[in-house]
Image: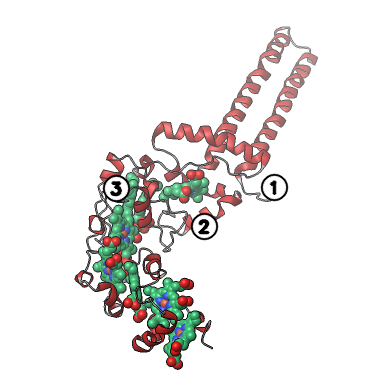
Amino acid sequence: MTENSTSLPGEMPENDEAMAEAAVPTDVAGGPEVVNESTSEPSGEPAVEEPAKRKRRFPWKVLGVVAGVALLVALVLPVFSMLQPGYYKRYPSLHARMENWQVSTHAKVPCSGCHVNPGAGGFVSFAGRSIPAFYSQLIYGPKSNNLFASPSRQACQKCHTTYRQVSPNGDLLIPHRAHVQVLKLDCPVCHKDLVHSVNEQGFNRPEMETCLETCHDGKKATNQCVKCHTQKQVPESHLQKNWLAVHPEMVNKIDCSKCHAWTPKFCDDCHSKKPKSHVGNWKKNHAAAAKARGEKGCLVCHGGEKFCKKCHD
Ligand code: HEC
Ligand code: HEC
Ligand code: HEC
Ligand code: HEC
Ligand code: HEC
Ligand code: HEC
Ligand code: HEC
Ligand code: HEC
């Protein structure tokens, strides 16, 4: 894989090391040559001693420096490469994540913006993970193991505060401080669709179901609509006694989805249950109901016309 991608920095250490190795023999060979030339000259004795001293010390120093530089490159290069978002293109398993990130609100924030914790500690732990991961990728190929963990709240707080109380449209009450500082929740617990995926409704935003399933089940925490929403009080229409019977008539007058769209199943769940009207000899009696109410209403629960066609050609 790395052979194909010529511009990737992954190949650099090989070249550098090769260059470094190549440099060592020429320097070592350079030493003795000078010695030979100087000894062959018929000059005084001190001239013979000086190069002899150099012969012992000189190569070790160079070798030490070269090895030091090579080691530094070998350590710095992986960390540097893995701070570049482009590096992760080589991992096929990350392609979907990268595509989503590129069109997200955080496209200008590099991977390290969210995935490296702030401060020296975060950087050192990132370096500790990236060096083995880099060489493992060179040797065994791009398998993504352990590259990044889910971001911590500290990483998001490099740019965001926790003072936010309501959503931008004003409907949703979401006291961030209570959740982040008091309950110590990490941001991705709720913002898991922030950059790498969209939720079922097609947004990169938290889903209501996450709240209801994780904590707001009515026992651990409230599940009353009005505790979270300012614009979803039970409307007056619903308070009439025969609401269930008359709600079909209201469908064209009120936008039901304003409150019920959070789950496409809300209406369907109930409609899959046999209604009270279907009692007695319904097989025979539905004829009258269908004539009186119109067949359109029947199809709300009975899907397409296939159901009726089972018996009516
Ligand atoms: C704005 C913040 C942000 C940026 C920028 C970002 N991510 Fe993420 N990343 C997240 C969040 C939040 C999660 C946790 C939710 C999830 O798994 O999708 C995550 C999860 C991941 C995971 C899975 C971690 C696990 O739990 O196993 C990988 C891998 C990953 N990101 C890679 C990347 C790469 C590669 C880039 C750069 C191209 C990147 N991310 C940029 C926020 C970010
Ligand atoms: C490097 C700074 C930076 C970091 C780190 C960062 N953000 Fe943001 N975030 C921004 C900026 C800037 C915007 C506004 C983008 C815009 O509106 O186009 C933004 C917008 C947002 C939005 C609103 C837009 C949307 O997509 O819903 C949310 C939510 C958000 N960030 C959450 C997070 C979370 C959670 C993390 C940590 C995983 C995080 N951010 C990390 C800079 C950052
Ligand atoms: C308990 C769940 C939860 C946690 C934890 C959480 N958020 Fe949020 N956040 C939400 C919800 C829900 C919204 C409203 C989304 C909407 O309707 O736009 C939101 C909205 C936001 C917005 C504004 C979105 C916009 O469209 O402008 C930002 C920015 C944001 N959160 C950042 C963060 C950061 C940073 C953290 C961690 C420090 C965090 N959130 C933790 C649930 C949470
Ligand atoms: C624990 C808090 C919470 C409770 C309780 C709650 N919701 Fe939500 N609701 C949310 C969150 C979070 C979202 C997602 C925010 C988004 O999509 O911007 C949401 C989204 C929605 C949406 C889709 C977005 C919109 O405004 O059109 C509807 C509709 C909705 N809720 C209705 C209700 C109704 C009705 C109830 C009561 C049965 C309820 N919610 C109870 C938190 C809650
Ligand atoms: C302003 C918000 C809102 C609007 C608009 C709305 N509803 Fe509701 N609806 C609610 C709430 C809140 C509940 C009670 C949910 C709960 O407590 O679980 C509810 C409950 C219901 C129930 C169940 C009643 C029961 O006895 O179990 C039906 C049926 C229903 N709505 C139908 C509709 C229809 C049909 C429309 C459109 C004509 C509609 N709703 C419009 C908020 C709304
Ligand atoms: C609590 C259960 C329940 C919920 C929730 C519910 N319905 Fe109904 N719905 C019924 C029942 C029962 C009938 C049949 C009434 C009858 O035949 O007397 C019905 C019938 C209907 C009909 C017309 C059927 C006909 O025969 O004309 C429509 C339209 C309708 N519902 C729309 C909705 C919509 C839209 C929603 C969601 C916003 C919804 N309903 C939610 C129980 C429910
Ligand atoms: C609130 C939803 C709902 C409405 C409205 C509704 N039905 Fe049904 N109906 C059902 C369910 C649920 C069943 C049971 C389905 C099954 O057993 O597969 C059923 C069964 C039936 C059956 C089969 C009865 C049997 O014994 O096999 C007929 C016929 C039928 N409905 C006709 C109608 C007609 C005609 C209308 C309109 C006047 C109507 N339904 C309105 C939910 C509804
Ligand atoms: C289980 C088989 C069956 C299914 C499914 C069924 N019907 Fe019927 N339907 C009948 C029978 C049997 C009759 C004759 C009943 C009678 O007149 O005694 C009938 C009669 C009718 C009539 C009266 C026809 C006439 O010419 O007088 C209407 C209207 C009707 N059905 C509508 C529907 C609709 C709409 C559906 C789908 C929602 C449906 N039926 C599904 C068996 C079925």
Under mark 2, the amino acid is Glu
Residue 123, percent across and down? 45, 34
The label nearer to you, 3 versus 2, is 3
Residue 197, percent across and down? 47, 56
Q: Check the image and report above or below for 19 versus 105.
A: above
In the picture, measured across the screen, residue 274 lies left or right of residue 219, that is right
Residues at marks 1 and 3 touching, judged by CB atoms closer than 8 Å:
no
Q: Check the image and report above or below for 218 versus 289.
A: above
In the picture, measured across the screen, residue 293 lies left or right of residue 230, that is right
Q: Kindly identify which residue carries mark 1.
A: 3
Q: Residues within 10 Å of mark 3 (few under 14, many from 20)?
A: few
Residues at marks 2 and 1 touching, judged by CB atoms closer than 8 Å:
no
Between discs 3 and 2, the one toward the N terminus: 2
Residue 247 picture quarter: bottom left
The Cα–Cα distance between marks 1 and 3, rounded to whole angstroms, is 58 Å
Question: The C terminus lies in which quarter of the figure?
Answer: bottom right
| Count of numbered circles on the image | 3
